Image (spheres, rainbow, N blue to C red):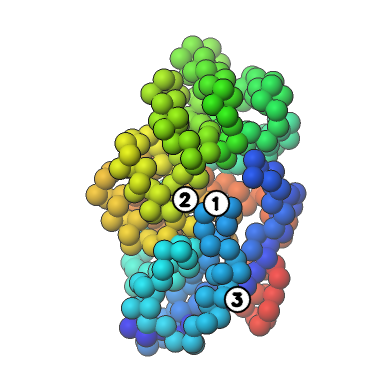
Amino acid sequence: MVYQFEFRSYRRKFATPLKTSHGIWESRDGVIIRLQDENGKVGWGEIAPISWFGSETIQQAVSFCRQLSNEITDEKIFSIPDRLPTCQFGFESARETIEQNNSAAKLSQNLTKSVLLPAGKAALSQWRNVWDIGSHSFKWKIGVYPVAEEVFIFDLLAGELPAFTKLRLDANAGLNYHEAEIWLQKCDDININNDIDLEIEFIEQPLSVDRFSQMLELSRNYATKIALDESVATLEQLQSCYEKGWRGIFVIKAGIIGSPSRLREFCLTHKIDTVFSSVFETSIGRKAALSLAAELSPQKRAVGFGVNHFFAENEQICLDNLWKNTSHIL
């Protein structure tokens, strides 16, 4: 099959810069692609790199798109190299939207979402804004401030959250081994004794990627689950961690992990415990990622896509304007 190909670059500013252990993130840059087949059917895809997470840079993604002609074939799409995982995702997703039925998309409407809270004290007020609209699962960034300060805030947050809330702690590889033990013991005390009816669902990526054996050890020493995130940013990393014995939770950032078809094959073959998570993509990339989540999440864990409140502008207006213009900054 031969497709007509167009693309546009975008930039979306966060309402408030996002603080993580990797630093401060002020805007989300990406690419929207449009494919049209020989019958006139149109498919949309999104390329949304996070280079510090292991994907290509936005400059590399744009450069790849610019070197293509205005026609692209299936063979070219499936030969995009692994060093360009977000390009693999964007082009394959656009192709799939032309060919797929809507069953997975319909199933994705039934997924529950875990809402991202801001790091530090801001979480103490922000959770109330989303609880009232039915979001009772939260993710809170840790490893941003000193551990004693964050544990103090955590105690306040745990005391305020309503009964039966689920809370995930995301360290973004920002802890050392001793700090990880402090957090895991703290979570075990809550999960095992649980006098406040709060469930700490898991701690996400407590240590850096090169500390896999230590995370494996921690997962065996504590009851609270550990989820790998940065360690499984690409398909190659996902396969490697599984082969080295990880049977805990795998956080799948579909937008940057690579080929959807190869991800589907791996997940269906190995039946891994997955949590699909956002890369702050637009509704175009989000729809494709959530379709995969509906298909490949046997444990039915809440997906980590509660992030729209972090952006300053109306997404649909931005996307409409983007395609009207040759060059547009969201």
Tag 1 residue: 53
Q: Tell me if mark 3 has few (under 14), some (14-19) or many (20+) residues whose alpha carbon lies within 10 angstroms of its own.
A: many
Tag 3 residue: 8
Of helix, strand and loop, which one carries label 1?
helix
Q: Tell me if mark 2 has few (under 14), some (14-19) or many (20+) residues whose alpha carbon lies within 10 angstroms of its own.
A: many
Q: Nearer the viewer, residue 35 or 70?
A: 70
Q: Tell me if mark 1 has few (under 14), some (14-19) or many (20+) residues whose alpha carbon lies within 10 angstroms of its own.
A: some
- Amino acid at circle 3: Arg
N-terminal of the pair, mark 1 or mark 3, is 3
Quadrant position of residue 246: top left
Q: Which mark is residue 71?
A: none
How far across and how far down the image is residue 107, in percent? 38, 53
Q: Nearer the viewer, residue 134 or 215?
A: 215
N-terminal of the pair, mark 2 or mark 1, is 1
Q: Residue at x 33, y 67 (%)?
A: 101
N-terminal of the pair, mark 3 or mark 2, is 3
Q: Are marks 2 and 1 in contact (CB under 8 Å)?
A: yes
* Residue 309 relative to residue 95: left or right: right
Q: Residue at x 38, y 53 (%)?
A: 236
Q: How many marks?
A: 3
